Image (spheres, grey):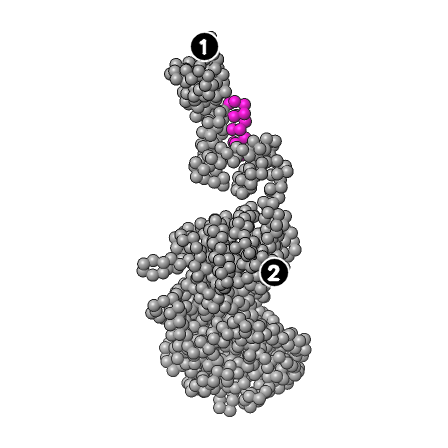
Amino acid sequence: MNNFEPVIGLEVHIQLNTETKIFCSCPNSFGDEPNTNICPVCVGLPGVLPVFNQRVLDLGIAVSLGLNCRIAKEFIFERKNYFYPDLPKDYQISQYMVPLGSDGFIEINSRKIKIKRVHMEEDAGKLIHTQNGSLVDFNRAGVPLLEIVSEPDIFSAQEAYQYLNELKLTIQYIGASSCDMEKGFLRCDANVSLRRQGDKELGVKVEVKNMNSFKAVRDALSYEIKRQANVLSKGGRIYQETRLWEENKQKTIVMRSKEEAHDYRYFPEPDLVRFFVSDSQIENAEQSLPELPPAKRKKFREFYKLREKDSEVLISNPKAAAFFEQACRNRDDFQNIANWVIGPLQEALNTSSIGFEEAKIKPADLLKIIDMVADGGLNNIAAKNVLAEVVNTGGDISEIVEKKNLRQVSDESSLEEFARQAIEESPKAVKDFYSGKENAIMFLVGVVMRKSKGRANPKIVKGVIERRLKNAQS
Amino acid sequence: MDLHKLSGWEIAGKIKAKKLSFEEVFDYFHNRIIKFNPQLNAVVRWFDKPLEFNRNSDSPLAGVPIVIKDNICLKGKETTCASRILKGFVSPYDSTVVQKLKNAGLQILGAANMDEFAFGSSCETSCYGPVKNPWDKTRVPGGSSGGSAAVVSAGLSPVSLGSDTGGSIRQPASFCGVCGLKPTYGKVSRYGLIAFGSSFDQIGPFSRDIQDCLYLLNIISGKDPKDSTSVQAEPLKNLSVQDISGLCIGVPKEYFIEGLSEDVDKTIRQALSFFKNNGAVIKEISLPSTEYSVAVYYILASSEASSNLSRFDGIKYGHREKAESLSEVYFKTRAKGFGREAKRRIMLGTFSLSSGYYEAYYLKALKARQLIKEDFKAAFKKCDLMITPTSPTAAFKIGEKLDNPLSMYLSDIFTISASLAGLPALSVPCGFTSQGLPVGMQIIGNYFQEEMLFNLAGFYQKNTDWHKKIPQEYE
Ligand SMILES: [Zn+2]
């Protein structure tokens, strides 16, 4: 096994989140009733012609630039010919000879993984198999895709996993796609071959398909690397073929051999004209590109001075990072804010099963809560209580605190009665305290907190109880 | 009244003057179709009443009946390209040209027969059986728009639309003794035209009177947001037919070759002398790459066709054979649905695009196409327009070339070059052979110079009456 080096290339398709499809004006939307977002063009009726959606080009350029690619100044579309029932025209309009973007890279672990090409194409429909036969849903036909192909420049399953995460993050920051793999907005195929350590030439490559998560990609590649190493070390031969990852069995199986490979008969799409990309178009796109993960990491490290782990948690969720940065605008307690965003706020969102994009809370609301906790107006339990409400409803924090009667009680005289009751009702804890178990006092604090419905300031409570116990003893 | 002897614009004038009603005009031609179509087989589908049209149009052809080729989609009607594989396909949308016709107030009579998917030069490959030439029913009307040419020739409709990929409007116009124009590529929207060779296809008009052709072109042309390859151009002005002196007419020497029939040669030379006598300058020019045009065309157009016809797979619409598996659906449906010539072109195109052959065939042909364009570019520096025979012979006998594809392909030898270059070209009747068959001359212009073609043809028609001749039976 150690004598072999795996070489991996990844082919990723992402669905672009344009309003309309790539060659017609049907809505690009997910999850609708079958065959509702269709028209003669995307169903490929006789006589129809494609008309290119310029928004696809804008997003294509943005993603290509985000992946450090060179942009083609001039490009055409080509037809990729093959028969399949989900492909309305029995050819796919794609790009072949000159992709929109080329020669880019993604940096992982301080190494640049080369990206060969980024090109635009249309998606196919979807087959639905029923007991009475197979049906086709063409809602997805004509949805714009970007295909992003890496060079065989990835050398482990883990590196492939990291590459995919970084790619997804970059595209999410650009806002070109949600990259939601469960919805098929991101799909990934892998090519993997093994060569002897030190060899320059690549071994025979196997294509692996049908991986439904980044983890599955990593698992499938690990499996395939082991399988190939096993074959090779026994003197066997690897055949060029396409294999399917079987998630349940955690193994790959042969789907088709090289002999069955398609001849796609690419040729220029005569129904579309040649397209030109001007220098100013590229410049504009460059300028409107948002801050991408590498620059963000640098800023979070050098300016906000966050712990690296926290920085990574925030950056891995563009919406969370944006929330954090907005909250930091007129403040300097960056790490504190980060703690709140990653901690209680994220928890409140998880409890409500919503993401940052749906949450009603504004950065200013969180700051208000943070400040109230700091100056003793709110304790941590109450703060969570407020967060749980405000993420769903929004609204004025002070009002919510008042309405829920959550303002922290720090006034000693108001707590005396609770403390007296707690001591009276908990003889065992009192006994423990007197016998030297200092910690028993925390039990009593807990009783007071319960009695005050969480509003009591625990520090003050502890002081009051301590004083009462000591006074009683003397 | 013999409405079929009038031009379209004359009929429109009478409607405008309330001397005729829309219905009278429609019924007149509808009845002629019912009476004469059985012997000609030129119309495959006709309607009892016109498809909904704009009754308030002020277009010069408002109210004029028209037949359109069976490869132009008509909403709510079967559109089949004369192929079994599309039997039963009812288009849910109107092609752009049909929309424009309806807006301009034309009354659509029906759909014209054609070669299957426009593959052919004789209308013999139609699944509805061959079309007969009105001048001699033992002969072909030309193709692929033979039905569109025959209906105008026999007076079943004053005007019609066809489509031209390598000569499919001009060659049948010539065989049937009518005018037919292939516009500059991009002048007319292809949206709704069932594609054959997408980088060649153009819809164009047929008429006897050249003025009708011009009016019809103005109605159907223009940039269409649904067709990215369409181009905005000014509508043509009315004919200006007073003077042709000083006009330089190029005559490409490569077109007067072995295989050109004596009758055709003689007739074209007579037309050229006519122009010369009226002050035009006739100049011999050269288009040196002409000899490659047929080969280049059949590779490129068939390549595009092989891909364009993939969608007829039995899955979504049209004919489907019973089958046990997916691949059997494809094999059986396409084996049964396509005729011999369609299969031949699909095979030829698929081969030319296959890996290992792409460079030698498709790519090389693409380069040769560029050479042919360059030829024309150079030639148009030396002349204003060109005149050539439209076809090497007059109409041939039904069955004569059906089993010899190569000789069939050569009947388009003079029309193909302009198609490869995307230039506008017009066939105008200019006489008859000794057997009484019509002969057409082809006028080729520079890009978007349709006006010049029409003016020359208009001058010619003003001073000759070839275009007024009607086959005796249909007088
Ligand atoms: Zn659509």
Q: Residue at x 42, y 83 (%)?
A: B132
Q: Residue at x 45, y 64 (%)?
A: A256
Q: Which residues are magenta?
A: A363-377
Does residue A299 show up?
A: yes
Q: Residue A213: image x %, image y %?
A: 47, 50
Give the amino acid at mark 2: Lys
Which numbered disc flags the more N-terminal residue, 2 or 1?
Answer: 2
Q: Residue A200 bears which disc, if any?
A: 2
Q: Residue at x 53, y 49 (%)?
A: A158
Q: Residue A473 bears which disc, if any?
A: 1
Q: Residue A177: image x %, image y %?
A: 51, 50
Drawn side of residue A121 relative to residue B76, left or right: right
Q: Residue B165 bears which disc, if any?
A: none
Image quadrant in which you'd find residue B330 = bottom left
Image quadrant in which you'd find residue A437 = top left
Taking the view exactly as shown, the residue that stands out farthest to the top is A474
Give the amino acid at mark 1: Gln
Does residue A189 show up?
A: no
On whether residue A369 falls in the magenta region, the answer is yes
Q: Nearer the viewer, residue A246 or A105?
A: A246
SS for tag 2?
A: loop
Q: CA distance from mark 2 to mark 1?
A: 83 Å
Drawn side of residue B48 relative to residue B17, left or right: left
- Total of numbered circles in the picture? 2
Tag 1 subunit: A
Q: Residue at x 38, y 72 (%)?
A: B332
Mark 2 CB lies closer than 8 A to ligand 1: no
On whether residue A31 falls in the magenta region, the answer is no
Tag 2 subunit: A
Q: Residue B89: image x %, image y %?
A: 39, 67
